[in-house]
Structures are given as structure tokens and as C-alpha cells.
Amino acid sequence: MKETLMALMPEFGEVRNSDLREKTIAVWLEAMKGAGWTFDDLKTMPFTLLISGTPVNLIEHTLAVTRTALAIADELVKAYPGRLAVDRDILLSGALLHDVGKMFEYTRKEGRFIKSASGELLRHPISGAAFAYKHGLPESVVHIIAAHSKEGDGLRRTLEAVIVNHADFVNFDALK
């Protein structure tokens, strides 16, 4: 399963810290297993239920947000040399995991993806952050997951969380 995930989402390989990389991959695989999804399911799972008929799946969205976040980080570091630092591994892990909770937020009924009973109680930033924390991800990554959506409004976000938040909304707003 790990090889399949790495082939679908090669950005996991860009996380330089091997322990963080392995934990990030493990969280994705454990979420899939725990929620009962297959790779084929994820290829058809919409990245959002808020855009009717969206042709963008969860994997495509996750990769787009991750790439957008990396581009933002690279430009900021280039524009402000020596004045700010982005923890690239934390950014990558958080971006790759920002929507992992959607595997718990969604279910399928009569061939359609709908909000699950769990999703009615806990939106994906909360369930995803809890799941990542349970699996030993650093608090800085858990923070990105928890703060990437409206649930993070009003929090003091780290630079990495600000970047993922904006990368996510740019991708969402471009498609709605």
C-alpha cells in the first residue's frame, strides 16, 4: 500500500526527515484503513461536498495544495532572504495531511459521497488533527491540520499554517 500511495503522491518523498516522512505516510494509510477506503475510492472521492459535481478528487486537491504551499514558501524565502524561515518538512507534512480527516467526514450512500455521522459531529480539521496527534505527528503539523480551515480563524497560526491555509483557499476558491 505504501508504494501505491508514494506513486500517487510522490511529494511524500520530499519530506527529508525520515521519521516525519514515515509518520506522515502512516497517518494517510491508517486513515484509509480505519475509514475503509481504497485507492480507487479516493480517486473518485470529491475534495469537497460544497461544490456540487466537482471533478477534483481528494488526492488531486491534496497535491495541488501541497504544491501551491511549496511555491508560496519558496517565493517568501527568496523575497525575504534571512528574514524569515519556513520549515519545509513541517509544511510538507501539514499540507499532505491537511484534509486527511475527510476520510472520516465522508461516507458513501447509494453511490454518492455524503457527510458521515462522524462528519456531522466533527469537521475534517478536527478529526484529522486528532488522528495525526494520536499517531505521533509533531504538534506543529497537528496545528496546520487543525488551523487550515475556518476552524483556525482567530488562532495565531504559524507561518507554515498560514501558508497551507491560503494555499487551500486559493485552490478551493479557484474551483467554486
Image (spheres, grey):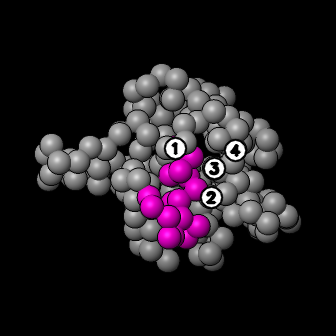
Marks 4 & 3, CB-CB < 8 Å contact: yes
Q: Which residues are magenta?
A: 141-157
User: Residue 125: which numbered mark, if any?
Assistant: 2
Mark 3 residue type: Ala
Q: Position of residue 167 (x, y in %)?
A: 40, 60
Query: Badge 4 is on which residue?
Result: 131
Label located before the other in sequence (2 or 1): 2
Label located before the other in sequence (4 or 1): 4
Label located before the other in sequence (3 or 1): 3
Marks 3 & 2, CB-CB < 8 Å contact: yes
Query: Badge 3 is on which residue?
Result: 129
Residue 75 is left or right of residue 42, and the answer is: left
Q: Position of residue 41 (x, y in %)?
A: 71, 50
Label located before the other in sequence (4 or 2): 2
The local secondary structure at tag 2 comes to helix
User: Residue 141: which numbered mark, if any?
Assistant: 1
Is 36 in front, or is 138? 138
The local secondary structure at tag 1 comes to helix
Quarter of the N terminus within the rendering: top right
Q: CA distance from mark 2 to mark 1?
A: 12 Å
Q: CA distance from mark 4 to mark 3?
A: 5 Å
- Neighbourhood count class around disc 3 (C-alpha, 10 Å): few under 14, some 14–19, many 20 upward: many
Residue at the outermost top position: 18
The local secondary structure at tag 3 comes to helix
